[in-house]
Image (tube, rainbow, N blue to C red):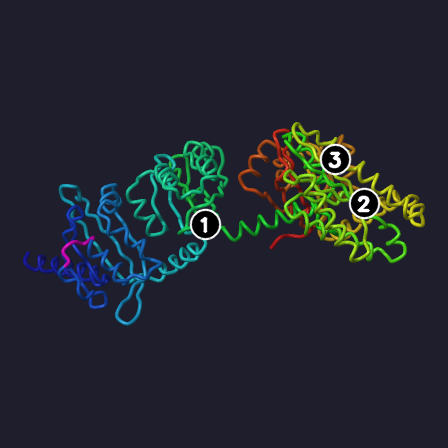
Amino acid sequence: MGRQTDDLNDIYAFVDETMTENFLKLAKVNIMTGEFEFMKQSMELRDEGYENITNIYSYIKKQVDDKLVLSEYASDYLRYSDPKYVQKRVFAGEKRIIQSYKRKAGSGFMWVTFGIVVPSGCSEENPWVVFSWREADTDTITMIDALATLSVTYYKILRVNMEDGTFEAIKAERSEHEHASKLDKISHWWKVFAEGGNVYEEDLPVYNEFTDIEKQRSHFRESRDRVSCRYRRKSGDEYRWAQMDLVPSIEYSEQHPIIILYVKDIHEEYLAEQMRHQRLVDSFNRDALTQLFNRHKFNEDLGKLRKHGADRLLCVYIDVNGLHETNNLLGHRKGDDMLCAVADALRGYFPDDRKYRIGGDEFVVLSKELTEKNAEYLLAEVRRELEKDNYEISAGIEYAQGDVDVDKTVGAAELAMRADKEWYYKHTNSKRRKREMNEELEKMLTEKQDADHFIEAISDRFAGVYLVDLRLDMTRDIYMPRYFREILKGTGFRYSSGLRAYADKFVKEQYRKFFEDFTDYERLEKYIKEKGVIEFQYQKIDNEWMSLHVMELDNTSEEKFETIWIFARGKNQ
């Protein structure tokens, strides 16, 4: 019997030594009071000057404050200096709680895995656990490297239980860890975060709708699709664009509805995207030669003025004298120089007003601020500027106030310009007959030339560019190949029907569902409002890869929701 007892004690000693030798430090901890006692403490992690600290939470906080823990891991480790955080996890029944980090050790650094071992009898009446520190293994370090890579992109990663709304911060800034430790529900965090002025005021409606947890529960019950929200988030003294993504976890199920919440800074990326979007919109609203607004934008702005009204409006209507003769005698490049000189003069003297090139040689200025007297003075300055290069213009001015009739005001300015032009040619008879004979032809040629140049420039890259009103299911083409025009003609020019017919005829079967989804205009409009730009790639039957980009134009109103659809050749990398 004595020999058996000795053998058993030897086994216990062996197990005890084997277990403890893998750890650099072990401490018995009362998680309610913070009282602790080291059971083992190796030289590698023996921190000098900590001998008189009697509270484990103060011990961990001092390690962080003394910068023993590298800054990128400090906020994660610091959570364990919060008694409520530790108690919550322990008493929730977690048996294995670990956190790996990198810290100073002697003259170098060491990867450490911190853990809390919870005995089966642990309770609020018997709140003793074991805090452990051991050197991290290779697999742990590999996992941390992967998380660090994610952290470069995402500055907040949360694991959220959609059933009860509880969450765990996988990665968050130190201030947000402290914020999270005071809250236990994601909906409460979202609310407190917004109420603290951390969301830009204009973005609050979008943010509040997205963070409606009942709405998101409903979404993930029906779909496993990622959902995203863009908003401006306070960062220091400024607001920066951020994107919040909710993605079902790999462990997601109806019984265990876990999602991962990611937040990343997209400020530079979003501004660049907005700039690209604006440049694209501008390319359809601006005259390619002069960079003034074009006739399309002119008609659009007149429509807005008619709809919303104006209490005063001034219109300057201008025609460039001698453009046709200049083109014929000196070439179109010289004629282009003349038009650009007029545009530059208008920019210089009417800087705050809307300026348009509405035809080959016709320009319009619209202003809600200028008086007729101001406009006459500025127009005289424009004339003097142009005379330096021997350029001349005919012009008419009309000013209206009160209940302004927009069309009547513009029409009166045009009539005044015609009268001025008539006077000009009456006093320049040698040029008059030639101009009158060729005026209409010149406009036609100029318009055709502009269109041909545009189509030639984009045809190699783009397979189609269309403006589509989702409310009316109608399209206006910027560039439409002949085969698609025939498809539309066969569908009564209904864009959704044409899109489906195109997919059936030219697109590989596995990608046709995307086109069907794109003809659900109500859903598409909602996605565009949320994401700004929708894009996807698909492959045609002939194996050619294509990209489709859809975005909203700025002229949306209650009556219409106009979008631009760009079909580009090639696969985005």
Which secondary structure, mark 2?
strand
User: Which of label 1 and label 2 is nearer to you?
Assistant: 2
- Badge 1 local density, few (<14 within 10 Å), some, or many (20+)? some
Q: CA distance from mark 1 to mark 2?
A: 56 Å
Q: Which residues are magenta?
A: 53-57
Q: Which residue is mark 3?
A: 410
Q: x, y percentage for residue 181? A: 29, 45
> Magenta-highlighted stretch: main secondary structure?
loop
Q: Is residue 555 above or below residue 76?
A: above
Q: Earlier in the sequence, mark 2 or mark 3?
A: 2
Q: CA distance from mark 2 to mark 3?
A: 15 Å
Q: Earlier in the sequence, mark 1 or mark 2?
A: 1
On residue 394, which mark appears? 2
* Towards the viewer: 78 or 532: 532
- Badge 2 local density, few (<14 within 10 Å), some, or many (20+)? many
Q: Quadrant of the N terminus?
A: bottom left
User: Which of label 1 and label 3 is nearer to you?
Assistant: 3
On residue 264, which mark appears? 1
Residue type at tag 3: Val
